[in-house]
Amino acid sequence: MRPHASVALLILALLTLASCHKSLEYQIHGTLDNLPQIKELYLISDMENGIPFDTIKVKGNKFDYTGTADSITICFIGNLNDSVTLMPFFLEEGAIHLVISKDQHKCEVSGTPLNNEWQKLNAEGYKYMDEALGFIANLNENSSKEDSLAAHEKALVPIGKLASLYYQTAEKNIDNELGYFLVVTPAYLDENQVMTLINKMPKSMRARPPIKDMEAFIRDQSMGLNEMEDIMGDDIAVMPDFSAPDLDGKMVSAMDVVKQNELTIIDFWASWCGPCMQEMPHMVQLYKLYHPKGLGILGVSLDTDAEKWKNAVKQTGATWTHISELKKNSEIAGRFGIDAIPFTLIVDKEGNVVASGLIGTELEDFLHQNLEE
């Protein structure tokens, strides 16, 4: 009897273990909005390498996909080769409904708890962003200093509301994957808010490498420019020159670009970086507004695939100079100690570093203060 009992207990233990590790099942039902050229879409969950884990065939303007996952996770869907930006959503149990459009306002995700919450944040966020952009849309190089200042002050009100909404949503979801995603892509959070949210995370989530890297990054940022000067080895913080091929394969010196502008943003980004692509429309808007006043941008891509890099530049309308080593381990990024993107350095025409790590509204405020006459 004992051998049979042992076998029964072993089977019971295995069944119990299997039930504890049951995969979640999800279904994706999608529609393309006015994108007749799209024949396939890629699903990407490995954003570090940007490698798709599967391809979805599009029939007409519809697509469907069924899969399983070990746990709820962030995923991106799109096709940069055909100018469809990567749209984030969450793989979780149930039926997920997607609408993909070139117009981000028309993109939608719904059907499951986290995706419904994510859609709510995006819908409210676009309202605030449109309101802010409405105040500065009519500004140009002929606008007076008073008009420009008044417009930016008005724009700060909805931007502040957007930042509060972003923080509140992250705090409400700090124990799930939506909260985690908002913390590791902190478009509208300052460093103190990020650390406050990290401190509220479950220990298991806080132990994840991206969170540890972010904590280390914030500590490094808090060193300030004095420590940056020591790292660079000069009496003042001067950006060391570096070179890499541009979109046409021609070697470009960073300092050659910097010398042409009053201020230059050195923008470290990549086509596979979701937060970078989300920030790019804002960068394009800032460039249009401040380039006539002396702003330059040098895009330093950490891409390894030349075609994806070039397609992303074309898709976003980022008309400034772009360079890339097209290496997995960028020597330029390593030289500056950059381990998370998007990341910016702002330098004057002599290459002196005047600010670092600014994106979103912080970057916009800095340019307004330093380039308005």
Image (spheres, helix red, strand yellow):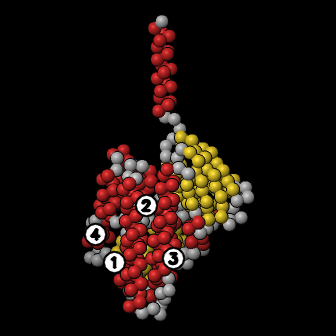
Graded by Cα atoms within 10 Å as few (under 14), some (14 to 19) or many (20 or more), the crowding at tag 4 reads few
Q: CA distance from mark 4 to mark 2?
A: 22 Å
The residue that disc 2 covers is: 185
Q: Position of residue 243 (x, y in %)?
A: 48, 73
- Quarter of the image with the C terminus in it: bottom left
Graded by Cα atoms within 10 Å as few (under 14), some (14 to 19) or many (20 or more), the crowding at tag 2 reads some
Q: Which mark is residue 354?
A: 1
Name which residue type carries label 1: Val
Residue 86 in the image: above or below residue 259: above
Residue 65 in the image: above or below residue 261: above
For the point 61% across and 46% down, which residue is it? 27
Left or right of 318? Residue 254 is left
Name which residue type carries label 4: Gly
Camera-nearest label, 3 or 4: 3
Camera-nearest label, 4 or 2: 2
Marked residue nearer the N-terminal end (1 or 4): 4
